[in-house]
Structure formats: C-alpha cells, structure tokens
Image (spheres, rainbow, N blue to C red):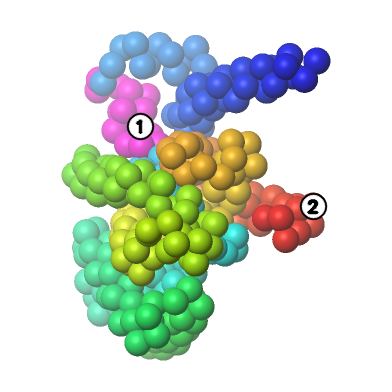
Amino acid sequence: MKVQSGAKTAWIRRAALLLLPLAALAWSLAAGSLELSWSELAALLLQGPGDGIEQTILWRIRLPRALLAALVGAALSLSGTSFQAVLRNPLADPYLLGVSGGAALGAVAAISLGFTAALVPPLAAFIGALTALALVYLVARAHSCSTHTLILSGVMVGSLAAALLLFLLWRAPSDATRQAVFWLAGNLSLATPGWLAWGWIWVGSGFLLLWACAPQLDLLTQGEESAADLGLNVARTRLLVFTLAGALTACAVALAGLVGFVGLVIPHICRLLWGPGHRLLIPLSALFGGCFLMIADAIARSVYAPAEIPVGVVTALLGAPFFLYLLRHKGDGL
C-alpha cells in the first residue's frame, strides 16, 4: 500500500509540474476586462498575431504581461529560496535585507523629481536596490558578514530608506505621490519586448549561477560549522549567494514594484512537497513562483474589471493567510 501511495503521489507531482504552468498561463491570457473563453483563446492562439482587437489585446498586451509576471515571480522565489538557505532563517524573504527599500527610494526619488518617463523609475529602482545591497554588505563586513549582522544591517538600511521615502512622499506633488504609490503597490505594466529580453537574460543568468551553488546551499542549511568542516568557504559562498539573490530582487522590483509574499511562501510550498534539496528546490521555486504571480495578476485584472487591483495587494491577500496557516501548523518546523 505504501508503494502504491508513493507512486500515486509522485504521479500527482509530475502532473502538477506540467499542468499548473499551462493553466496559469491560459488563465492569465484569458482574464481581464475582455474575458475570453477557452475556445476563443485557443482560436486566437492558433490564428497568431493580427490587427483585430482581440488579437492585439492577446498578443501585444496580455502575453507580454504574463511573461513578465512569470519572470518577476521566478526572480522573487529564487531570491527567497536563496536567502532562506544562506541565512538559515525560514522567515527570510527577498525584502528582508533592505533591497526593496533601496529600490523604492530610487523609484520614488525619480518620480518626485519629475523624471516620469516610462524607463526612468525602473532604472532608478534598480540602481537604488543595488546601492542598498552594497551598503548592507559594507556595514556587515566589519563583523565578518555573519548571519545576524547581515540581517541587522538589512533592517537598518531598510529603515533608513523608509524614512527617506516618507520624506519624499511628503514633499512630492499630489500627482507624483499618486504615481509613486501605484508603483509601490506593484504593477506589471512594463511588459515591453525590450524589458522582457533584458529581464529574462538577467534572471536566467542568476538562476543558472544559483543552481550551480545548490550543493553549497545544502551544506549551509546544515550549519556553518558543519559546512566549514566539509571544506566549504562559508564567507565567500554567503557573499556570492547574497549578491545573486539581491540582484534578482533588484531586477524584480525594478520591473514590477513591490510584490510581497512570493519569495516567502512559494519556497515553503516547494520545500514541503519536494524536500529541502536545492538541486530540485531552486528550479521548482522559479517555476511555481512564476505560476503564482501569473495567477495573482489574472485575479487583479478580473475582480473589478475594467479597473485593476495592484498585483502586490493580491499576492499579500493570497500569501499572508497561507503563511499564517503554515506558521500555526508547522511552527518551528518551518
């Protein structure tokens, strides 16, 4: 009976790996103010790009947006998985180390200064995130970049960025404040071919490098002393993973604003279903993170259509209750 049960569970998991991405993509393409039935969606996909209204919406708006959601969700999940491993903290997420605060500060500074062209706030957010990442490392380096020092440095940098952000919002004109708040709540409107190409190259490179670090991450989760005894250079590995995860977070925030809970919840789900081995956990986190954000974006465009809820609100409403459930039933076993 146990063998049959294990085979059935394995079959369900393999089916989920195939069906969930397809279902998430299909729902993301069909949902919105112009809702498409499954038959209409299939027909439009078979027809290919065209000049009709429905073809334009599908191929030029929804498909790039779905790809951007998959990209951002994968980046946040990869970052969360990496931070949880290198910090040995199940509550670590991409925004723990001040990266999001630096990104938000950069974007809002650009908006409040009047630089509202489509490309400027994301670029400013990316620069702000990397600046915060470097500042956290410089502060923590004085104490050998220990786990506790990295976390405390990240909290300090994030608090400083939040204070400066509130000051900028207080000083900014009402139109700039409204635009900044919309960006901070998370949106996927930057789904242009150029941004997608740049984002996929950046995230793809980060994924490959983190995947190559999977054995080292497995060692780190066993404890720094044990990893060092097995020959791992703990400080160098921590710095490498910290930099890669922070760069992925910077990319995600620059492309979509602040989208919470993806990098916190998705790694936990994958770890519960497939175990803690990072050789498998890293690609699965990327896959399911992308699916989760595509689904959240479909909900954001459907609930109050034609109006749109910020996707960051939807991810928080979906992710927070689930994480509270995990915390209640798993406790320290998270």
Main SS, magenta region, reads helix
Above or below, 123 relative to 128: above
Q: Is residue 69 visible?
A: no
Above or below, 122 relative to 308: below
Label number found at residue 19: none
Residue 168 position, x and y percent, is 37, 84
Q: In 3D space, how far apart are the residues under numbered discs 1 and 2 (Cα atoms)?
A: 38 Å
Residue 225 position, x and y percent, is 49, 67
SS for callout 1? helix
Specify the quadrant that holds the N terminus: top right
On the image, numbered disc 1 is attached to which residue? 63
Residue at the image point whose x is 48% and y is 50% from the top: 218
Tell me the kind of residue under disc 2.
His
- Front: mark 1 or 2: 2
**Residue 103 falls in which quadrant of the image?**
bottom left
- Badge 2 crowding class, 10 Å Cα cut-off, few under 14, some 14 to 19, many 20 or more, is few
Residue 155 position, x and y percent, is 49, 80
**Residue 212 falls in which quadrant of the image?**
top left
Above or below, 188 relative to 46: below
**Which span is picked out in magenta?**
50-67
Query: Which sits in the foreground, 9 or 62?
Result: 9
On the image, numbered disc 2 is attached to which residue? 329
Residue 315 position, x and y percent, is 57, 52
SS for callout 2? helix
Residue at the image point whose x is 67% and y is 55% from the top: 334
Above or below, 316 relative to 267: below
Query: Which sits in the foreground, 223 or 260?
Result: 223
Residue 51: say if magenta: yes
